[in-house]
Image: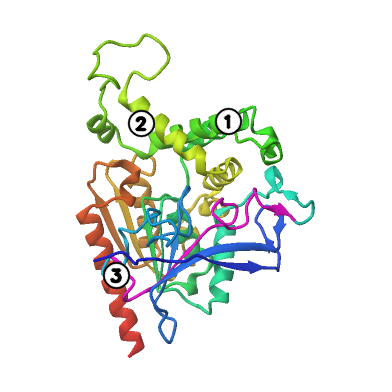
Amino acid sequence: MGSIGIVSPSAMHFAEPLLLQSGAQIGDYTLMYETYGTLNADKSNAVLICHALNASHHVAGTYADAPKNLGWWDNMVGPGKPVDTDRFFVIGVNNLGSCFGSTGPMHLNPATNKPYGAAFPLLTVEDWVSAQARLADRLGIDQFAAVMGGSLGGMQALSWSIKFPERLRHCIVIASTPKLSAQNIAFNDVARQAILTDPDYHGGDFYEHGVVPRNGLKVARMVGHITYLSNDDMAEKFGRKLRNAAETNDYKFDFGIDFEIESYLRYQGDKFSEYFDANTYLLITKALDYFDPAREHGGDLTKALATTRAQFLIASFSTDWRFSPERSREIVQALISNRRQVTYAEIDAPHGHDAFLLEDARYMGVVRAYYDRIWEQTAGEAV
């Protein structure tokens, strides 16, 4: 197994306005994307990878001018890897509103010739899926062999199965949920309030002031990052270890950094505030909050999934308390009630929600075996 190697992003512009669930619309927008592998003659081997909150279209490989910028799911996608690019044509798309090249709040609004800022319309998971479908149309892909994602990406994959049931043969939902719990919405709102109340936010128009609401972004990331880790994982990595234990075992008796976990979270917050856009963070966390396909069916998830036609792989992790296994089992039960073909894996891993991004032999084995089955079906159809 090896990396896909050096890759290059592409941009696709869309002039036709996209009508959003909010009733607003956005036109003259661009989507950034990357592709890996080769599309076969009948275009039946395409796989769409949907990204989570702070990821992008850069799923695998590296860039010639940035060799250390490894794709966020490079351990999953590449030659001989679970999503094998020697077999499949893999597409990663950066969602609208993001800060990694696709049109977002930091880009110029054609109507004002100023950055969109807070005027950028709110988006939903379903809006992202609609935009992705347009890109697939342009690429001439009528049906995906699979649509796959983890966390927020899993919500998009699930939405694909509902919104475009005939356009995917397999739906792979990892460490995700059919809707956020009240606790999850609460965490997201605390993170948003950290940004909204930062004096450098300027109502979303901080670009024109030449500043960044860095403190707000830092705190938002610290809050979010806590929810991505399990208590056991944090205890094993940090426990109550003091930052300067080698120098002294005494507390500092101030509000600075005493514990290793404090140092780690502040490092994560600082790093995040250097590259992520505050308005994008607000947009994406709100889209997370809004996702609830059962809402239009009186809260009945079985009815919401009744239109699906795909086969499903649903995977969860035992220590993921943000999107717990119970939430994945809700999806599984609703699919079984609709007589859909479902494979479910609940993996006993210590890493919390972040486990979907990490190496775990059992997890990788489940995904690999499922893609082997997809390939057998795809190759059989091509005969």
Q: Residue 47: image x %, image y %? A: 41, 70
* Label 2 SS: helix
- Residue at the top extreme, as displayed: 253
Q: Residue 33: image x %, image y %? A: 51, 65
Predominant SS of the magenta segment: loop
Q: CA distance from mark 2 to mark 1?
A: 22 Å
The residue beneath circle 3 is: 79
Q: Nearer the viewer, mark 2 or mark 1?
A: 2
- Residue at the left extreme, as displayed: 361
Q: For residue 193, which numbered disc appears in the image?
A: 1
**Please, is residue 157 above or below residue 168 in the view?**
above
Residue at 34% of width from left, 18% of height from top? 258
Q: Residue 57: image x %, image y %? A: 48, 60
* Label 1 SS: helix
In the picture provided, is 172 more to the left or to the right than 359? right
- Residue 314 part of the magenta-drawn span: no
What's the amino acid at mark 2?
Answer: Tyr
Q: For residue 264, which numbered disc appears in the image?
A: 2
What's the amino acid at mark 3?
Answer: Pro
Residue at 31% of width from left, 79% of height from top? 377
What's the amino acid at mark 1?
Answer: Gln
In the picture provided, is 47 more to the left or to the right than 100? left
Q: Residues within 10 Å of mark 1 (few under 14, many from 20)?
A: some
Q: Residues within 10 Å of mark 2 (few under 14, many from 20)?
A: some
**Please, is residue 216 above or below residue 228 in the view?**
above
Instruction: Find out whether the residues at labels 3 and 2 contact each other: C-beta distance under 8 Å.
Output: no
